[in-house]
Amino acid sequence: MTLDDYILQHIDPEGDYLYRLYRATNIRLLHGRMASGHLQGRLLKMLVHMIRPENILEVGTFSGYSAICMAEGLGDGGKVYTYEINDEQEDFTRPWIEGSPVAGKIEFIIGDAITEAPKLGILFDMAFIDGDKRTYRETYEMVMGILKPGGFILADNTLWDGHVVDHAYDRDGQTRGIDSFNAYIAKDPRVERVILPLRDGLTLIRKKE
């Protein structure tokens, strides 16, 4: 038994719907491992319980796994607004979101969150950034503009499979995007931050009040 197996056996179960979604994601979609999966999904739900947001912004829906997990942690009236820029993703993702037990708490939108999310006119309590790594800084600045003081940003993939410390990947645009984002966040006086070495790296960021 690996340590990962041990962890999964001692946390809340994934649930049948999410299990089937994760399996379908890996069978039918390229780069299926981008979906959050059991451990990160349970963490996202727990963080939503802890932060108790009313409105969550997600940038990068992919197969809908993380949006469903966050919606599971929302109270009555809470909403996840999730943006996916790749319109070819819609045929797979929309049925899974709309067929989920928390469909009423998720607004799935095809479009560029950087330009479209501010048009909602909503101040968010929490955001999950998991879109194009090359535009993480631009996404972050957009989110900061529509995030309440004291609100939280979760940024996924911030260790990028270890590539951020491997100079062989210096010319890769996504690695450069993540590295630039990490350096920018580390010096931003508007926030507090910590990187968790979970899966591919998850940065928790709190906007100061």
Image (cartoon, grey):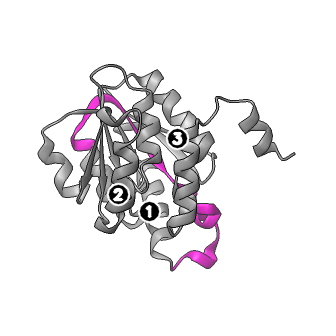
Q: Residue at x 51, y 80 (%)?
A: 171
Asked whether 85 or 21 is in front, the reply is 21
Asked whether 75 or 158 is in front, the reply is 75
Q: Does the magenta-highlighted stretch encompass residue 128? A: no
Where does residue 65 sit, x and y in percent of width and height? Answer: 47, 46
**Position of 203 compared to 132: left or right?**
right
Q: Dot 1 surroundings within 10 Å: few (below 14), some, or many (20 or more)?
A: some
Q: Which residue is drawn at 54% across and 46% down?
A: 202
Q: Earlier in the sequence, mark 1 or mark 3?
A: 3
The extreme right residue here reads 1
Q: Name the residue under label 2.
A: 137
Q: What element carries label 1?
A: helix
- Please provide the residue range marked out in magenta: 144-171
Give the distance between the C-alpha atoms of the residues marked 1 and 3, in whole angstroms. 36 Å
Q: Name the residue under label 1.
A: 180
Q: In which quarter of the image is residue 114?
A: bottom left
